[in-house]
Image: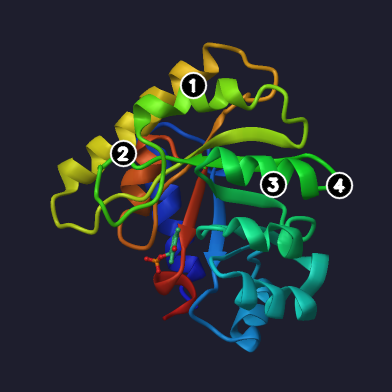
Amino acid sequence: MNLAEIKENINEACKRSNRNQEEVTIIGVTKYVTIERTVEAMNAGIKNLGENRNEEFLKKYNEIGTKAKWHFIGSLQTRKVKDVIDKIDVLHSLDRLSLAKEINKRASKPVECFIQVNVSGEESKHGLTPEAVIPFIEDLTTYENIHITGLMTMAPHIEDLDKIRSVFRLLVELRDRVQSKHYHHAPCSNLSMGMSNDYEIAIEEGATHIRIGSKLVGS
Ligand SMILES: *Cc1c(COP(=O)(O)O)cnc(C)c1O
């Protein structure tokens, strides 16, 4: 458990960018680890957990329940929505209208969603193109169970830190554009970006939610 070290790094990144540490939520990504290890992380102070597969999420949810705040960070199949939607607190991977439609139909209360954006354009990545985001949000106006809390992206897994930074900057610009439209259903103030290898850069650029797995709980 490297929480102390990670918190120190977060603190330093906040200082460099004149931000307040409280603006950054650490999501402990427990997809690689057991329930025992997940509980250990919670006892160390991690209250937000991230899972990317519905079976694994349900297994952990059945043990841990609402003691954690649950972030679903993987791609969600439309036919699985009904099994998980009232158990997750935040969805980080809204990327298509058919998924929004199913969530809107199945959820018993509004769900906080991040729209996943494929900023880098890598074929292997899920997410809307940056240009598609605003039209997508406008299509969601009448979906009363969808609340757009922010945008999410994954930077490419590369050595070039400037390139990684530019991906995060593009997401920030897009978030600012959405915010300036003052959509009632999409305040879109948050940015879910930064993982084990790039969370410090993400924080310098404005991340509000970082998703850390391997460096926090191990892989
Ligand atoms: C696995 C995963 C993470 C965490 O990755 P690490 O590099 O282990 O920190 C973050 N976000 C998403 C969407 C993931 O699938």
Which residue type carries mark 2? Val
Marks 3 and 2, the one that precedes in the sequence: 3
Element under label 3? helix
Instruction: Give coordinates of residue 143: x percent, y percent.
Output: 72, 30
Give the residue displayed 46% in from the left and 63% down from the top.
212
Q: Is residue 48 visible?
A: no
Q: Are marks 1 and 4 in contact (CB under 8 Å)?
A: no
Image spot of residue 117 (x, y percent): 41, 40
Q: Are marks 4 and 2 in contact (CB under 8 Å)?
A: no
Label located before the other in sequence (1 or 4): 4
Identified by mark 1, the residue type is Pro
Tell me if mark 3 has few (under 14), some (14-19) or many (20+) residues whose alpha carbon lies within 10 angstroms of its own: some
Q: Are marks 4 and 3 in contact (CB under 8 Å)?
A: no
First-in-chain label (1 vs 2): 2
Query: Which of the four quarters of the rendered structure image does ligand 1 lie in?
Result: bottom left
Instruction: Tell me what residue is drawn at x 35 percent, y 39 percent.
Output: 204
Question: Is 33 on the left-hand or right-hand side of 62?
Answer: left
Circle on res. 40: none
Residue pointed to by mark 4: 108
Q: From mark 1 to mark 3, how far is it between C-alphas?
A: 19 Å
Disc 1/disc 4 C-alpha distance (Å): 26 Å
* Image quarter of residue 205: top left
Name which quarter of the figure residue 185 lies in: top right
For residue 54, side relative to residue 215 (left or right): right
Q: Nearer the viewer, mark 4 or mark 2?
A: 4
Q: Which residue in the rendered view is the most extreme toward the right?
A: 108
